Image (spheres, rainbow, N blue to C red):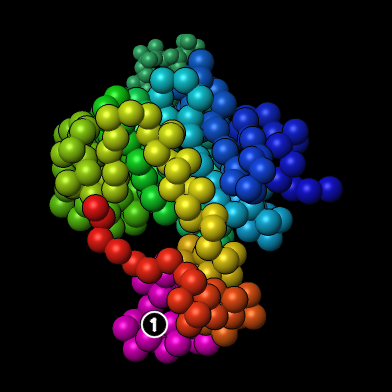
Amino acid sequence: MSQTDPKSFNSLAIEARDNVVFIVRLNRPSKRNALDVATVEELVRFFSHAQQEGVKAVVLAGEGDHFCAGLDLVEHWKEDRSPDQFMHVCLRWHEAFNKMEYGGAPVIAAQQGAVVGGGLELASAAHIRVIDQSTYFALPEGQRGIFTGGGATIRVSDMIGKSRMIDMILTGRVYQGQDAVDLGLAQFITEGSSFDMALELADKAAQNLPLTNYAICSAISHLNNMSGMDAAYAEAVVAGIVNTQPAARERLEAFANKTAARVRPNS
Ligand code: 1HE
């Protein structure tokens, strides 16, 4: 059975479009898409198999007015977890988010409303982040008496710098609009719907060859974890495989024959 079959998901609402762009929505709008254990397990399953099962790009979105309210605080409170139980919860979050970032299928996050706590950790594992006028970011962990556990110390620090990430969690500061883009929390802001813009980007990315997208959406992250010398070597190895793939020959030939589109400035 396919592991990405939309019908087999409950906490996620998944739609497969004709061009193999998948729309993956967190589907707990009445809980503001808070991440409970069941949702994280479905994220692990989907993103562990997406690239191998032919998914060409993913729009990751949230049902309702908010992208994601982070950790399901009510589940966490009710479960009254031990330290080692919560460590394992966090390890499943890391599994899900690492499969997103390193899995090889482009993931475009379409964000509206609250992107807070673990919701920002989830978004930060996407390859491109789009926001609209309603989107706002925060790390309320400080106020809740807890700490980040889904990779914010790594990915959010990477996006905005360690000092600004520390300020966000210490003070509960909220960022939105162009300020959020200037800071690096998102790449694009639209006057319209973040979903429409994300879908447009996903459609574009899906036109690339899958092996090329695999390198872009897996190798770049791996290479960034390496020393410069090792990264240069590994980049050459990846390019050796990707740049000689048979499927690329047609595109290279079209360039040589002058039938391929040229790169032009925006009009
Ligand atoms: C939730 C959650 C949640 C809403 N866990 N149930 N995250 C936070 O600290 C953010 C907490 N949430 C909020 O600040 C607000 O809910 C929102 C700004 C996201 C939305 O506000 P609003 O007025 O639209 O909704 P609401 O009335 O606050 O909540 C509606 C319902 O969603 C309500 O449930 P109901 O059954 O009473 O209707 C809320 O309980 C529920 N809900 N957010 C559980 N987060 C790996 S470590 C990661 C650490 C973190 O992520 S810390 C950040 C946690």
Secondary structure mostly taken by the magenta-highlighted segment of the chain: helix
| Horizontal and vertical percent position of residue 70 | 42, 33
| Horizontal and vertical percent position of residue 132 | 31, 31
Q: Is mark 1 within 8 Å of ligand 1?
A: no
Mark 1 neighbour class, 10 Å CA radius: few under 14, some 14 to 19, many 20 or more = some
Determine whether the residue tagged by mark 1 lies in a helix, strand or loop.
Answer: helix
| Residue highlighted by disc 1 | 231
Segment colored magenta: 218-241
Q: Amino acid at mark 1?
A: Ala
Q: Does residue 3 appear left or right of residue 213 in this picture?
A: right
Answer above or below: position of 104 versus 82.
below
| Horizontal and vertical percent position of residue 133 | 26, 27
The residue positioned farthest toward the top in the image shown = 30
Q: Does residue 125 appear left or right of residue 46 in this picture?
A: left
The picture quadrant for ligand 1 comes to top left
Between residues 11 and 232, which one lies in front from this camera angle?
Answer: 232
The residue positioned farthest toward the front in the image shown = 258
| Horizontal and vertical percent position of residue 260 | 47, 70
Answer above or below: position of 31 versus 126.
above
Q: Quadrant of residue 188?
A: top left
Between residues 65 and 18, which one lies in front from this camera angle?
Answer: 18
Residue 24 appears in the rendering: yes
The residue positioned farthest toward the right in the image shown = 1
Between residues 95 and 200, which one lies in front from this camera angle?
Answer: 200
Residue under the image location 78 percent in, 48 percent down: 2
Between residues 148 and 79, which one lies in front from this camera angle?
Answer: 148
Residue under the image location 47 percent in, 20 percent down: 64
Residue under the image location 15 percent in, 52 percent down: 163
**Residue 263 falls within the magenta-colored stretch:** no
Q: Does residue 192 appear left or right of residue 94 in this picture?
A: left
